Amino acid sequence: MNKTSLQGFTNLLFSNTFKFRAMRFLSPLISGGKNYHCIACHSFLDGFVEAGHAHDSLKKHEVIGGGIRKNARCPECNSVDRERLVLLYLVYETKLFQNRHYVLHVAPELYIRKFLSLRKSLDYLTCDLMRRDVDDQQDLTQLSYQDESFDAIM
């Protein structure tokens, strides 16, 4: 194998797309036949459970993602589909975990917060106006941070 081929193979092997596809293929083998994997708690599952609210106004206004959703909540950690989708995006579609980054997370969701706060490559700060369980209580429209203090704001 020449150097160019080896480099191409190495790039493919360490690409996020390859890792995602490999995980989808290997999950049933690793998990004893369970077809679902929760990225928030790393449980292998037979499936997720229903979640959501059955409000008439959600149906009336055809709110996307509103109402009762099948396969929405993890039965192990209670993370919901939206949180898991954001985590998948951050892991496989961004370079957030490749180098040191400063991240401000406004109104942090529980499982996204847990996931990001454990990453050693992030200087992670949470912020919210009303909540007391955050690092900093501030109004989003009047933040006290200097310009360009963060690499990412969520």
Image (cartoon, grey):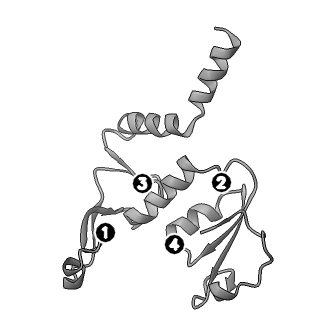
- What residue is rendered at 41% in x and 65% in y? 82
Q: Earlier in the sequence, mark 2 or mark 4?
A: 2
User: Disc number at residue 65?
Assistant: 1
Q: Earlier in the sequence, mark 3 or mark 1?
A: 3
The answer to whether one can see residue 14 in this image is: yes
Question: The N terminus is located in which quarter?
Answer: top right
- What residue is rendered at 78% in x and 74% in y? 147
Q: How far apart are labels 3 and 1 at the CA level?
A: 19 Å
Viewer-proximal residue, 107 or 144?
144
| Crowd band around label 4 with a 10 angstrom C-alpha radius: few (<14), some (14–19), many (20+) | few
Q: Earlier in the sequence, mark 2 or mark 3?
A: 3
Please count the marks in the image. 4
Q: Nearer the viewer, mark 4 or mark 1?
A: 1
The x and y percentages for residue 49 are: 27, 63
User: Is residue 75 depicted above or below 18 in this figure?
Assistant: below
- Amino acid type of the residue tagged 1 in the rendering: Gly
- Snapshot quadrant of residue 2: top right
- Badge 1 marks a residue whose secondary structure is loop
| Crowd band around label 3 with a 10 angstrom C-alpha radius: few (<14), some (14–19), many (20+) | many
- Amino acid type of the residue tagged 4 in the rendering: Leu
Q: Nearer the viewer, mark 3 or mark 1?
A: 1
Q: How far apart are labels 2 and 4 at the CA level?
A: 19 Å
- Badge 3 marks a residue whose secondary structure is loop
Question: The C terminus is located in which quarter?
Answer: bottom right
Residue occupied by mark 4: 110
Q: How far apart are labels 4 and 1 at the CA level?
A: 19 Å
Residue occupied by mark 2: 96
Q: Earlier in the sequence, mark 4 or mark 1?
A: 1
Residue occupied by mark 3: 38
